[in-house]
Amino acid sequence: MNSQTLSPSMIRKLGLDALYKALGPVDMARFLQQMGTGVGDYTKERATWLKDLNLKMVIDEIKEKRKKEDIGPNS
């Protein structure tokens, strides 16, 4: 494949071809059924979910999760 930018239709065709090759027609159809467009406005909903979150809270949660992983049964 060359380094030119592919059109959206060509990306879709190549992607479907790859799915067909990897999964076969039945599992490709099953996979595509899972990839619905969804409903709602993700950007607005995300802003609502994250409105009380700040960078310090995210960092503290990451540190806490890492700490818990280090204390696991195989440590």
Image (cartoon, grey):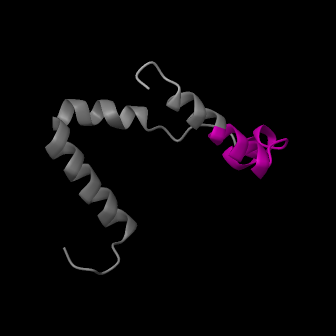
Q: Residue furthest front?
A: 75
What secondary structure predominates along the stretch shown in magenta? helix
What residue sits 25% from the left and 59% below the top?
14
Q: Position of residue 72 (x, y in %)?
A: 49, 23
| Residue 57 image offset from top left, x and y in percent | 77, 43
Identify which residue, 32 or 2, lies in the foreground: 2
Q: Residue furthest right?
A: 52
User: In the figure, is residue 67 to the left or right of 58?
Assistant: left
- Stretch of the chain drawn in magenta: 42-63
- Closer to us: 29 or 73: 73
Q: Nearer the viewer, residue 20 or 69?
A: 69
Q: Quadrant of residue 62?
A: top right
Q: Is residue 8 above or below residue 3?
A: above
The residue lying toward the viewer, choosing from 42 and 59, is 59
Instruction: Specify the quadrant that holds the N terminus.
Output: bottom left
Name the residue rendered at 51%, 31% in the picture.
70
- The answer to if 25 sits in the magenta stretch is no
Q: Is residue 41 left or right of residue 48?
A: left
In this view, 38 is above or below 56? above
In this view, 3 is above or below 11:
below
